[in-house]
Structure formats: structure tokens, C-alpha cells
């Protein structure tokens, strides 16, 4: 593992100067609003230094944003626009985001610490692709005619209509892409939006809303109210004029949202935590399995809900796999997001770093063996070395609690363990978001896919997310889906209409 220094680029220099001299506003009804809450300090996790000060929304600010969204839905132009016009405006937004890709990627790297190349070449283009995908759905949502069995002559059909105002609450780990994965289906369906980005990472959310206004998306259609979760987020979740809340974040907060939704029985989509298993059999292609398992936990410094944080590897290949993953970890360049050589950036905050280090210490105290990593990395940012722990048992906290950092817990299985036993261990979790298996045995892979208690299954790869594939979890990993037909239909309701013809 090597440590790298922060490398500025001209865009970063300009953005730093702009950010340091302004207060990031809320966006409500097309206006930049100062917000009534105590201003937030936005920090660069690569250096620990302050980037900017941000407005912070109060319950009153959220109420104003919801009122603007309601007006844009009920009496404004959005829900009454033709589907093709909504599609056109969303494509214009996608074009404009692409035109500003370098700036947006720099903002994301500064705000999250993620490697600029990852933001510029993967995460942000993925978000824009999701926007384009859902733009196409604007012209394809439909009801249908039904044959019914009542006496006489009838014309019966269903109408699919937008729910209304959608409150979207996004986390700090992949802010741009997750925000677009919610904004896109909401707007394409005809809903209007109040977006609450994480207080740690509001930069790209505000910029997206500004660009949306520039391309002609009407005022009030997309509002942004960054602020503290217990203030702005709670006000949005509790609001009686919000018809749907889509939340990505921790399972603990997701459970609290259930109570908030009870007031007006608003619809909920919850994409929550994960403790996803990776299973490697001896017949796996190790040239794919070793880097695949490594990147499934070390990508984005392990700050991924679907991270493959539990590895179950057959004892015949355990030493080879563990050594290979450790070598991969030790070769990673750890450093500032804007350094072109960085492969692993910082954690989002000092609090998160101490939390992750605490889990590592607890795992070692419980008897796990530290293979590599396990410490702070040098530098002023919130860095943790990529970590591998072996001889992990099921009762250890590192085996069953979500760490949200670059920490891999490794256990082994043997020839005496049937697929059913491996599945039992893989399913021994409160979560069920993602799962990965590496094997050349197609029957084993398909049986695993059928029996694993997870909403997503990857075979011989850690990748596989696509805008056309629904993404959601089982058990305490959430309710509902994003992406695909299922994702956009979650922003609509069905109305049944029957007409007596005789």
C-alpha cells in the first residue's frame, strides 16, 4: 500500500475558491434560499479541511419546499406535461450533466474523497445513464383494459398515475448517482420532488438542481433541502403532504421512518444496510475471484451497502485466496480523491473512521487473525488501510454487523459442508441485500441463486447493477426496488375504472 499526496487540478482550484467564499444555498421553488438552520460545515475527507459552509433546512424550510412541490404538481406544469415533453426535459438535463461532468466529478471527489477517476468515468456516467433510462419510461407507463365478469356490458380499464410529491432522502456514500436513481423515476412518472441530501455531502445535489432549472425544468419540480437528518429529514418524512418517501441509508433510520409514514400512510421505499456474503469454491477462476472479492469490499473504501464484507472460501483454496486478496489490498494506492494514482480514498469522516477501527479492534479481541491492514493510514484525511481478518466466527460482531469500511471478514468451509450448509451460513444474517458466488459449476450457481436470501445475486462477478434490473433487498435490507419497471412504478398508483355500457 502506498500513500499519495493531494494533487489539485484547475477545476478543483476554481471550485475551492468559489466554495470558500459562498454559502451553499437550499433550492426551493426555483430560488436559492439561505435556510433558517444553523449553517453546516462541509469538509474534504481527504484533508480534514473545511470546503464550504452550507445552508441548513429547518422544518419551516421543508414545509416551503413541500408546498412548492405540491403546487408544481397540482396546479403547475409538471404532472400535466405530455409524457414526451417530460422525457425531452429529462434528456436535456442528462445532456447538461454530461457537459458539466468534469465539474460535477470534481465536486463529488472533493466532497466524498472518492477517486476522481471513479467519479468521472464510472459513478457519474452511471447516474446519467439511469436518468436517460427513466426518461424513456415517461412515454411507456400505462394502464390496461380488463375483461370483467359482471352481468351486462362493461368497459373496464386501469389508470396508472403519479403519486404526487416524493420526498427523497439520500446518503453520503454515492450522493450523485443515488440521488439521480431517485430523481429520475420520480420526475419521469410525473411526480415532483423534495430532495434531502446527506448533510455531509450536499454539493452535487445543489448543483444538479441548479442545472435542472437552467435546462427548463420548472421551478418547484425539484427542490433541495440539505440539513440535519433529525431536523430536515424528519420533517420531510413526517410531512402530511408528502405522498411517498424513498430512503437509502441505515436500517435503524429506516425503521424509524415506518413510524413517520403512519401519519398519512405515505408510500415507502427503503434501501437499507447489508452484510453481503461472497462464496468461493475451489473450481472458481481465481483470476476473476480474487480481484472480484477484493473490489467487492474495497471499492469506495467499503462504504457500499452491497459490499461483499463476508467471505466464505473453501479450505482447499483459502490460503491462495486470502494471500491474493491481501496482496491486492497492500498494492492499493491510498490517498486523496483528486490524486490521479489514488485507488482507495478516505472514509467520509473522523467519526466513521473511528467506528471502523473500533470494529477491527473488536474482531481481533474476539479472536480473528489480522492478515493485513487494520490501522489508520498516514495523512491528514480520514484514511484506513484496507483490512483482511481471517478465522472469523459467526458470533463475532465483524461477522454480522455492518461496518461500512474496507474490512473483509473471512471464514472457511470444507468438502464436508454441503451447499445447504454453505447457504445456511451465508443466510445467517439480519440483512439480505447482495450475494456473490464464484464457481464453474452452473448447477451449484443456479441453486445458490434460488436459495440465497438476498435481493441481488452475482455469479462469477462482483458487478451486475444495471438501470434495467430492479435493485432491492430481503429481510432488514429494505422494502421495494429501484431501477427497472419496478422502480418507476413505485412512484405511481393504479386506479380502476368501470363503465356500464347498457
Image (cartoon, rainbow, N blue to C red):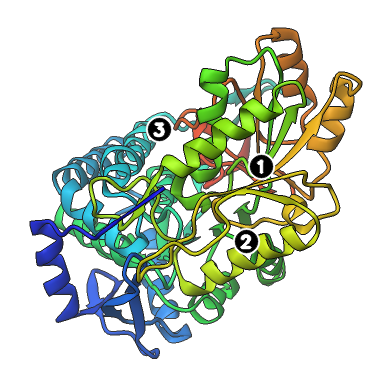
> How many badges with numbers are in the image?
3
Q: Which residue is mark 2?
A: 250
Q: Are marks 3 and 2 in contact (CB under 8 Å)?
A: no
Q: Residue at x 48, y 73 (%)?
A: 350
Badge 2 local density, few (<14 within 10 Å), some, or many (20+)?
some
Q: Secondary structure at mark 2?
A: loop
Badge 1 local density, few (<14 within 10 Å), some, or many (20+)?
many
Q: Nearer the viewer, residue 299 or 156?
A: 299
Does the image show residue 252? yes
Q: Which residue is mark 1?
A: 433
Comparing labels 3 and 2, the label whose residue is closer to the camera: 2
Query: Left of 348 or right of it: where is 113?
Result: left
Q: Nearer the viewer, residue 143 or 169?
A: 169
Q: Are marks 2 and 1 in contact (CB under 8 Å)?
A: no
Q: Is residue 439 above or below residue 426?
A: above
- State the mark number for residue 137: 3
Spot the residue most to the right.
416
Q: Is residue 276 above or below residue 281?
A: below
Query: How much space separates mark 1 and mark 3, taking CA atoms?
Result: 25 Å
Q: Residue at x 70, y 28 (%)?
A: 318
Dot 2 or dot 1: first in sequence order is 2
Quadrant containing the C terminus in the rendered view: top right
- State the mark number for residue 371: none
- Residue 470 occupies quadrant: top right
Badge 3 local density, few (<14 within 10 Å), some, or many (20+)?
many
Query: Left of 267 or right of it: where is 36?
Result: left
Q: Is residue 459 above or below residue 81?
A: above
Dot 1 or dot 3: first in sequence order is 3
Amino acid at each position: 500500500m502506498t500513500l499519495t499526496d493531494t494533487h489539485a487540478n484547475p477545476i478543483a482550484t476554481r471550485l475551492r475558491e468559489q466554495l470558500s467564499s459562498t454559502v451553499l444555498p437550499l433550492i426551493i421553488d426555483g430560488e436559492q434560499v439561505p435556510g433558517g438552520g444553523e449553517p453546516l460545515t462541509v469538509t474534504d475527507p481527504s484533508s480534514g479541511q473545511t470546503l464550504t459552509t452550507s445552508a441548513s433546512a429547518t422544518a419551516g424550510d421543508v414545509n416551503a419546499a413541500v408546498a412548492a412541490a405540491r403546487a408544481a404538481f397540482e396546479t403547475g406544469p409538471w404532472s400535466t406535461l405530455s409524457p414526451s415533453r417530460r422525457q425531452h426535459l429529462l434528456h436535456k438535463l442528462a445532456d447538461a450533466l454530461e457537459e458539466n461532468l468534469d465539474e460535477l466529478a470534481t465536486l463529488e471527489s472533493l466532497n466524498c474523497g472518492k477517486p476522481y477517476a471513479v467519479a468521472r468515468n464510472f459513478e457519474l456516467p452511471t447516474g446519467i445513464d439511469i436518468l436517460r433510462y427513466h426518461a424513456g419510461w415517461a412515454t411507456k407507463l400505462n394502464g390496461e383494459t380488463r375483461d370483467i365478469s359482471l352481468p351486462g356490458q362493461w368497459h373496464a380499464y386501469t389508470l396508472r398515475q403519479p403519486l404526487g410529491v416524493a420526498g427523497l432522502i439520500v446518503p453520503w456514500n454515492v450522493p450523485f448517482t443515488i440521488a439521480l436513481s431517485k430523481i429520475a423515476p420520480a420526475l419521469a412518472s410525473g411526480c415532483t420532488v423534495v430532495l434531502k441530501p446527506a448533510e455531509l455531502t450536499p454539493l452535487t445535489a445543489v448543483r444538479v438542481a441548479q442545472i435542472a432549472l437552467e435546462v427548463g425544468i420548472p421551478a418547484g419540480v425539484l427542490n433541495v433541502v440539505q440539513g440535519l437528518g433529525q431536523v430536515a429529514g424528519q420533517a420531510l418524512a413526517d410531512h402530511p403532504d408528502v405522498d411517498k418517501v424513498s430512503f437509502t441509508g441505515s436500517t435503524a433510520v429506516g425503521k424509524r421512518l415506518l413510524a413517520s409514514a403512519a401519519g398519512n400512510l405515505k408510500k415507502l421505499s427503503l434501501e437499507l444496510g447489508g452484510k453481503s456474503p461472497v462464496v468461493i469454491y475451489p473450481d472458481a477462476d481465481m483470476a476473476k475471484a480474487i480481484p472480484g472479492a477484493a473490489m467487492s469490499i474495497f471499492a469506495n473504501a467499503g462504504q457500499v451497502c452491497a459490499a461483499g464484507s463476508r467471505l466464505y472460501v473453501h479450505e482447499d483454496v483459502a490460503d491462495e485466496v486470502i494471500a491474493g486478496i491481501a496482496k491486492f489490498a497492500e498494492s492499493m494506492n491510498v490517498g486523496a480523491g483528486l490524486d490521479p494514482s489514488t485507488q482507495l480514498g478516505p472514509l467520509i469522516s473522523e467519526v466513521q473512521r473511528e467506528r471502523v477501527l473500533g470494529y477491527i479492534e473488536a474482531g481481533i479481541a474476539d479472536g480473528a487473525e489480522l492478515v493485513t491492514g487494520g490501522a489508520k493510514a498516514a495523512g491528514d484525511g480520514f484514511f484506513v488501510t484496507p483490512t483482511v481478518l481471517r478465522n472469523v466466527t459467526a458470533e463475532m460482531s465483524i461477522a454480522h454487523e455492518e461496518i461500512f469500511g474496507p474490512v473483509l471478514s473471512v471464514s472457511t468451509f470444507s468438502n464436508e459442508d454441503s451447499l445447504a450448509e454453505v447457504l445456511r451460513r451465508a443466510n445467517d444474517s439480519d440483512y439480505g441485500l447482495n450475494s456473490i458466488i464464484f464457481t464453474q459449476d452452473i448447477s451449484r450457481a443456479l441453486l445458490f441463486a434460488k436459495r440465497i436470501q438476498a435481493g441481488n445475486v452475482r455469479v462469477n462477478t462482483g458487478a451486475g447493477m444495471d438501470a434495467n434490473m430492479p435493485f432491492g433487498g430481503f429481510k432488514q435490507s429494505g422494502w421495494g426496488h429501484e431501477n427497472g419497471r419496478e422502480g418507476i412504478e413505485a412512484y405511481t398508483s393504479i386506479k380502476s375504472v368501470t363503465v356500464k355500457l347498457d
